[in-house]
Amino acid sequence: MSLTALFKQKTVFSLEVFPPKKDSPTDAILPTLKRLQSLQPDFISVTLGAGGTNHCDGTVAVADLIQNQLNIPAVSHVPGLYQSKDQVLALLDRLDQIHVKNILALRGDRIPGKEPVGDFNHANELVKFVHEQRPDFSIASACYPNCHTEAADFVDDISHLKEKVAAGADHLISQLFFDNQAFYDFKEKTEIAGINVPIEAGIMPCTNKNQIERITQISGVPIPKKFAAIMDRYQDSKEAMLDAGIAFAVDQIIDLVSQGVDGIHLYTMNKSKIAKRIWEETESVFAASNLAKQKANQN
Ligand code: FAD
């Protein structure tokens, strides 16, 4: 079943992992993936080039493990900024060979001091290219509940998001956010703009203060008072920060699922034990929500 069809049937639960460092063996990630398999995710996506590197071997190898050893649909991230059209086609061919037909088409993080290739300056150009060249691929794209840092304003950002969907993106995955109201407001804006593809909410369990500060600095995502209080009070206790960070993510997920979100995309940071704890706390909520969706589909 295609990923797009899946959204009609259930509240999708998906995970993101990143490949091992360039010189580490790919198999190093296998125990993590096996633990994540027990969460029964609908798909697992693998980053490419996030944080400044730009080599796809690790991403393809991990996608291969997910798709063909774990038998879970894999989604390969494909950032366009530093790849030519020929390189993108070669990457799609490699993915095709390992039966991975789902990608997350992105502009990609800028690498300081590195000149973009120029074939894909924005994600919509990449989406259009892949849609035309490989119509059998399913294409997801990124969206930003707190607005992308480079956009002039929300009107600007949503109009570009609409271009990505018009170009062929069939589902969206959001950047992390800590305030669900920001996601609901964003969702309303997309509906007003006529964007009608499923939008998964990106949730990142934040379990240490440095990590959160680094991420929010890069992404421009605001930290709500409730979460700032957790960080201030528990920053010196690893255990308390872990418990509170997990509880915060669980609270976000339960609220989102209750409000009928299309799906939850968990940024695992390859921390399978944390992801497992979150799944154990929310599994029943997904199950009940899926049952309600099935009943509604039958009527
Ligand atoms: P775009 O859609 O191109 O948008 C970037 C900015 O340009 C926005 O401000 C937008 O409003 C504007 N814009 C868009 N189209 C146009 C246009 N036609 N003309 C003018 N302005 C335009 N990065 C990686 O390198 N590797 C990864 O694996 C990775 N995974 C990610 C996964 C998720 C779920 C998310 C949310 C982000 C991920 N990123 C990754 C980061 C992403 O590459 C950055 O956020 C990047 O800054 C924007 O990517 P985009 O695809 O949203 O770009």
Image (cartoon, rainbow, N blue to C red):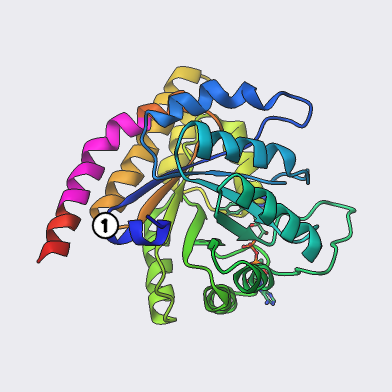
Tag count in the figure? 1
The correct choice, above or below, for 64 with respect to 182 in the image is above
Q: Is residue 26 visible?
A: yes
The N terminus lies in quadrant: bottom left
Q: Give the magenta-colored segment's residue range.
A: 278-291
Horizontal and vertical percent position of residue 296: 14, 62
**SS for callout 1:** helix
In front: 189, or 139? Answer: 139
Q: Is residue 143 visible?
A: no
Q: Residue drawn at (83%, 68%), measured in percent from left and top?
A: 118
* Residue pointed to by mark 1: 9
Outermost residue, left side: 299
Horizontal and vertical percent position of residue 43: 45, 45
Figure quadrant, ligand 1: bottom right
Horizontal and vertical percent position of residue 92: 67, 56
> What type of secondary structure mainly makes up the magenta span?
helix
Horizontal and vertical percent position of residue 99: 55, 48
